[in-house]
Image (cartoon, rainbow, N blue to C red):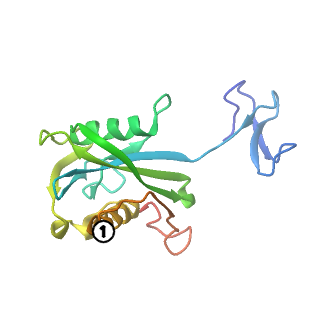
Amino acid sequence: MKFCNQCGHSVSQHIPQGDSRLRYVCDHCHTIHYQNPNIVAGCLPTWGTQVLLCRRAIEPRKGYWTLPAGFMENGETVEQAARRETLEEACAQLQCLSLYTLIDVPHINQVHIFYRAELQSLDFAAGEESLEVQLFEEADIPWSELAFRTVSRTLECFFADRTANTYPVRNEAVPPLSGLNHPNNNDI
């Protein structure tokens, strides 16, 4: 960050009084510019014993499979964001949403939140951000073609929990791959 979005003057980094972190602060109007993690909201939609996955039509990880998810927008709840992303990516309506995984990804300043949900019907299709959308049985999940580790982990938890028929809310963290400078650290 080079310029203040309040007055347009230059900013510098220092620890403001009463704070403990380095922040961008305007040299003119003294506005403190906080940078906080982004929230990714999504769903693990099911139909009977099958799970709905989307093949990504956009980067990052174009061509790989994922659960429908994306960045939360201002003015919406996490659940609304998860529903919206599922509608945008899979043209699918959901019911019975239940908070399921909350996965911290601190090395890229994100938090991924997934809900378990049931599809209202088999009326789904690829949205603009998806090449295709498909239901998979557990044995057919394309594990080596999943886009993100948070998606893999959510699916692993789901299939393990389904065996016991209990679905606790899970909170975990995803560490960086072999250090912050690893070339695949966008593979969250």
- The outermost residue toward the bottom is 178
Relative horizontal placement of residue 27, taking residue 40 as reference (left or right)? right
Q: Quadrant of the N terminus?
A: top right
| Extreme residue toward the top, this view | 7
Question: At 40% across and 61% down in the image, what residue appears?
Answer: 150
> Relative to 43, is 40 on the left or the right?
right
Quarter assignment of residue 138: bottom left
Tell which residue pokes out farthest to the right in this image: 17
| Circle count | 1
Residue for point 77% across, 31% down: 31
Q: Residue 11: x and y, percent?
A: 75, 38
Question: Mark 1, residues whose alpha carbon is within 10 Å: few (<14), some, or many (≥20)?
Answer: few
117 or 43: which is nearer to us?
117
The residue at which mark 1 appears reads as 164
Q: Is residue 139 left or right of residue 75?
A: left
Considering only vertical position in the picture, is 175 above or below 42? below
Q: Residue at x 43, y 61 (%)?
A: 188
Q: Position of residue 146 (x, y in %)?
A: 29, 63
Which residue is outermost to the front? 165
Q: At numbered mark 1, what does the secondary structure look like: helix, strand or loop? A: helix
Which of the pair 18/56 is nearer the observer?
A: 18
- Which amino acid lies under the numbered mark 1 shown in the image of this protein? Ala
> Could you say where residue 102 lies in the image, as x and y percent from the top left?
47, 55
Image x and y of residue 81, in percent: 40, 37
Q: Which residue is pictured at 15% across the width and 40% down the height?
A: 124
Q: Is 13 or 119 nearer to us in this picture?
A: 119
